[in-house]
Image (spheres, grey):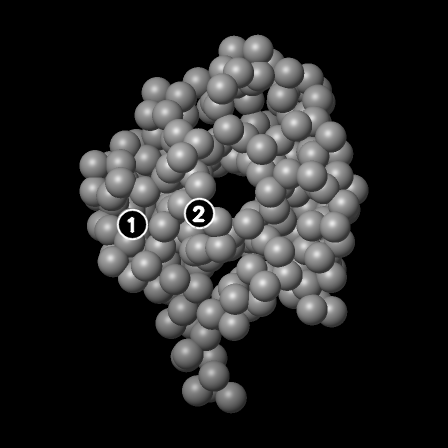
């Protein structure tokens, strides 16, 4: 597992996800999307749900960052929020499991610290990635011993509202890299090859790109809106 993940260093991971309300929602399609990503040069895949991951694993031999997105009542955390989702992912054993590592409470009032303890007790050898939205959250996740620190949620939470990872030559990412011991995965609104190259130059372990590659409705919208102007 560790050896497989070492292939990610300095390279591109493609997020192959489509939620139920999106046109490409289908495990079959995500498997083919992953295959296309591999042919294009991706060395890893980020994917949602055990069904999609199982299909992707049947199509490519790349390391997978696995998540389960699930909404719980009265809870803002939706990326792998409980042990139920961890257990589901362990049925297909992705190389890395990513989870919300913000300071928000999980279902039933569970803190991040307590949740990580539960995961480590049950699955001590599983690599974990922290999806963070602020520098402070990244530092705390590093202290908790996450194997990878991600910038996935920058700008997507109340505590990071208005923040953009790319501002001021990726200041947030640069500061996280400077302050943590574990590997930093740059993810979130990295939507051009130039941005991807830059975060690697700044010291990110690898870069995850999603919508700019795998959500054709969003890519099309950008072209269409440019013509409307």
Q: Position of residue 126 (x, y in %)?
A: 48, 23
Looking at the image, which is closer to me, 29 or 15?
15
As helix, strand or loop, the secondary structure at mark 2 comes to loop
Q: Is residue 17 left or right of residue 176?
A: left
Real-space CA distance between mark 1 and mark 2, rounded to the nearest whole angstrom: 15 Å
Q: Residue at x 49, y 19 (%)?
A: 125
As helix, strand or loop, the secondary structure at mark 1 comes to helix
The image shows residue 93, relative to residue 173, as above or below, that is above
Which residue corresponds to mark 2? 8
Q: Is residue 206 left or right of residue 4?
A: right
* The quarter of the displayed image where residue 38 is located: bottom left
Q: Position of residue 171 (x, y in %)?
A: 73, 61
Residue 17 visible here? no
Tag count: 2
Q: Residue at x 68, y 55 (%)?
A: 173
Other-residue count near label 1 (Cα within 10 Å), few / some / many at <14 / 14–19 / ≥20: many
Q: Which mark is residue 99?
A: none
Which mark is nearer the camera, 1 or 2? 2
Residue 172 visible here? yes
**Disc 1 or 2, which lies upstream in sequence?**
2
Q: Is residue 148 left or right of residue 26?
A: right
Looking at the image, which is closer to me, 152 or 160?
152
Quarter of the picture holding the N terminus: top left
Q: Residue at x 51, y 88 (%)?
A: 229
Q: Residue at x 40, y 69 (%)?
A: 219
Other-residue count near label 2 (Cα within 10 Å), few / some / many at <14 / 14–19 / ≥20: many
Looking at the image, which is closer to me, 113 or 176?
176
Which residue corresponds to mark 1? 34
* The quarter of the displayed image where residue 57 is located: top left
Asked if disc 1 and disc 2 are in contact, CB closer than 8 Å, the reply is: no
Looking at the image, which is closer to me, 188 or 77?
188
């Amino acid at each position: 597992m560790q050896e497989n993940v070492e292939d990610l260093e300095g390279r591109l991971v493609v997020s192959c996800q489509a939620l139920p309300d999106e046109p490409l929602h289908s495990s079959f399609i995500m498997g083919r999307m992953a295959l296309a990503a591999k042919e294009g040069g991706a060395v890893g895949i980020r994917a949602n749900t055990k069904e999609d991951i199982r299909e992707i694993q049947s199509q490519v031999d790349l390391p997978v960052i696995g998540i389960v997105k699930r909404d719980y009542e009265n809870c803002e955390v939706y990326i792998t929020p409980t042990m139920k989702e961890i257990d589901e992912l362990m049925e297909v054993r992705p190389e890395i499991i990513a989870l919300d590592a913000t300071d928000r409470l999980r279902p039933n009032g569970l803190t991040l610290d307590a949740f990580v303890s539960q995961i480590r007790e049950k699955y001590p050898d599983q690599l974990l990635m922290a999806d963070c939205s602020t520098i402070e959250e990244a530092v705390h996740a590093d202290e908790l011993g996450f194997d990878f620190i991600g910038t996935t949620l920058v700008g997507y939470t109340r505590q990071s509202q208005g923040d953009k990872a790319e501002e001021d030559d990726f200041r947030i990412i640069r500061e996280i890299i400077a302050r943590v011991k574990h590997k930093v995965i740059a993810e979130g609104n990295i939507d051009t090859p130039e941005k991807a190259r830059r975060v690697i130059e700044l010291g990110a372990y690898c870069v995850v790109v999603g919508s700019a590659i795998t959500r054709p409705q969003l890519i099309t919208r950008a072209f269409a809106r440019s013509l409307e102007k």
